[in-house]
Image (cartoon, coloured by chain):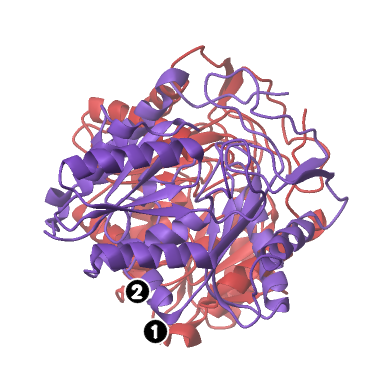
Chain colours: A purple, B red
């Protein structure tokens, strides 16, 4: 398989160099290059709020803008960035937790991968030793597979964006720790995702892609690290986007009722698929969802939860409530998601 | 060369289907599927402003989010979307001009390609017959080549984003037609771009890439349609991003002084390069620019002016003034660029 040219300096330093670049163009963020932690620079906006619940996430790098690109007003307070496709170690998560702590406790948003779960749990225990109360919200929105290469139970994927946006707004509005955590578990319960890969991706420094996918094949139910999905099928001669929309929405609808629901919708590119194609898919996904009686309340189309340069897309929905829509619409100011501020 | 799987339904309908998808998720936009024109739906926000100067752009599709993704409050009033990498015909541009007209005249933002220039000029004459005064701002910011495959003079590339954002804000603030046009010409004069390709791209329905680029090679000074740049060079073993930053900033600095300047900076992905890599490049570009005595006043990093799934990046700068920074910071609410609204 072909390995693409990487626009990096040294593959071994990819994450450090990317964080240095983030710092260079975002003075409103503080970047801790020792721990690979990105946090809000409250001195920049003078917006430090004692007692605000802190919101922390993190995970392996390679999914940009998730998570560091979602740090800022109305979303995350800090993100711990592991090596590419590798969980951050407990010390990194602890550093993020400390950076996010303003005395009101901290919520950890954790995607359900074995390493992430273990390391965030150890960090929560270390934080407890420092008298920082931590609640954990586990994200497991991917309906494609149960118990995969890196998970017991379902994987955390695109729905993470819904959780981080909604909880960030709730924390900004002064909601208390236990309530933010309970809201987060409700958002997870309301969120579902399903993804499709049209090409593999290659981690920096590797001489071969993470998996093989021949031209003319697509992998249904792919994860965000190239781990296997449900099955591999031939790409149809026409109607590729319609087929991806049909399979994705059917997998979600098999799991939760959509009829009569108001949805937050994310039509998410995996990194290498151009926006022209994501827009075509978005149209087909809306047709599938409205055909099942759902209404699109809000939608995002773009590369938000990625797998390096993988081609493909993921459909994520969250069955909204009036409260969730109000929190979704609240101001947000991060490198990758911004409105009203 | 390998042709990637396209997430489309029928390659011949790619632009129509993408616009249908845009309409499905953006009720605040009006999409004219006959003319492939996207315009602001003033009924949605109740923000119709008689006498406001209308701002229109357009060009070939395949550069998403440019231009349709920049339609909305504080930016374009309408965009005419040609076939992939093909100029819109005069009737399309006329339809966009009519949609954008509120009685205060219309500014055409035209990237300097022979077909675009001719077709926008014919549309301006047709608009004149309908008593719509049109002023044209020609964007030719690309320092890489003069007189290329599709151009006499320099090409219009990433700097188009600066022009559309700044003029959109100026029109929103009530600036008159001649002044908006003069401001636009000043923004063009202050803007420069240089791009590099790491892979080719393939137009929908084609069975081969638009150009050949072997693994291990990169093309310096690439355009946004895969047209040739300055020269093809081997990819260095390490420091790829540093080399791209060095060559790009040097090409720009050979053309305009940077010392003491405050810059708007766009580190733009060509479509297939992941954000992790663009962030690494952004760090190197800031090092190069500040090393030449410039200061980064504002920066955007992401896929804004693309060439389908081409891997690579473009560096665009605009030497700002206090007025330009105020207009850059003004509220904008479009599918792809949004803040303060």
Give the crowd class for mark 1: few <14, some 14-19, many >=20 residues within 10 Å. some
Is residue A44 shown left or right of residue A191? left
Q: Position of residue B30 (x, y in %)?
A: 58, 77
Residue B172 image label: 2
Residue A179 x, y percent position in the rendering? 30, 68
**Location of residue A120 with respect to B281 vertically, above or below:** below
Q: Residue B5 versus residue B107: which sits nearer the camera?
A: B5
Q: Which residue is mark 1?
A: B51
Q: Earlier in the sequence, mark 1 or mark 2?
A: 1
- Say how many tags the image has: 2
Which callout, 1 or 2, points to the residue nearer the camera? Answer: 2
For the residues bearing labels 1 and 2, Cβ distance under 8 angstroms: no
Return the residue found at the far right: A237
Is residue A150 positioned above or below A209 on the image?
below
Left or right: residue A228 versus residue A23 is right
Q: Quadrant of the N terminus of chain A?
A: top right
């Amino acid at each position: 398989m072909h390995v693409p040219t990487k626009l990096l300096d040294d593959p071994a330093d990819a994450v450090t160099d990317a964080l240095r670049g983030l710092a260079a163009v975002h003075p409103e963020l503080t970047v801790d290059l020792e721990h690979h932690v990105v946090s809000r620079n409250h001195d920049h906006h003078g917006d430090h709020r004692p007692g605000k619940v802190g919101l922390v996430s993190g995970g392996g790098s390679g999914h940009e803008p998730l998570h560091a690109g979602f740090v800022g007003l109305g979303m995350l307070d800090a993100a711990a960035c592991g090596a590419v496709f590798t969980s951050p170690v407990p010390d990194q998560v602890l550093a993020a937790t400390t950076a996010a702590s303003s005395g009101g406790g901290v919520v950890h948003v954790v995607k359900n991968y074995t390493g992430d779960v273990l390391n965030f749990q150890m960090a929560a225990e270390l934080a407890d030793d420092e008298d920082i109360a931590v609640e954990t919200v586990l994200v497991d929105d991917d309906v494609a597979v149960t118990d995969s290469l890196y998970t017991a139970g379902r994987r955390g994927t695109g729905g993470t964006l819904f959780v981080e946006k909604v909880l960030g707004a709730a924390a900004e509005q002064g909601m208390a720790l236990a309530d933010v955590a309970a809201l987060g578990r409700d958002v997870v319960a309301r969120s579902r995702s399903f993804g499709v890969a049209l090409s593999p991706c290659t981690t920096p420094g590797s001489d071969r892609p993470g998996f093989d996918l021949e031209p003319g094949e697509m992998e249904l139910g792919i994860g965000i690290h190239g781990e296997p999905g449900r099955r591999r099928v031939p790409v149809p001669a026409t109607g590729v986007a319609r087929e991806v929309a049909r399979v994705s929405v059917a997998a979600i609808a098999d799991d939760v009722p959509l009829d009569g629901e108001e949805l937050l919708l994310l039509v998410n590119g995996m990194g290498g698929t151009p926006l022209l194609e994501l827009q075509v898919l978005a149209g087909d996904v809306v047709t599938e969802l409205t055909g099942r009686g759902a209404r699109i309340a809000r939608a995002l189309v773009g590369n938000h939860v990625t797998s390096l340069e993988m081609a493909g897309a993921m459909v994520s929905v969250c069955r909204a409530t009036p409260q969730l829509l109000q929190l979704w619409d609240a101001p947000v100011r991060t490198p990758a998601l911004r409105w009203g501020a």
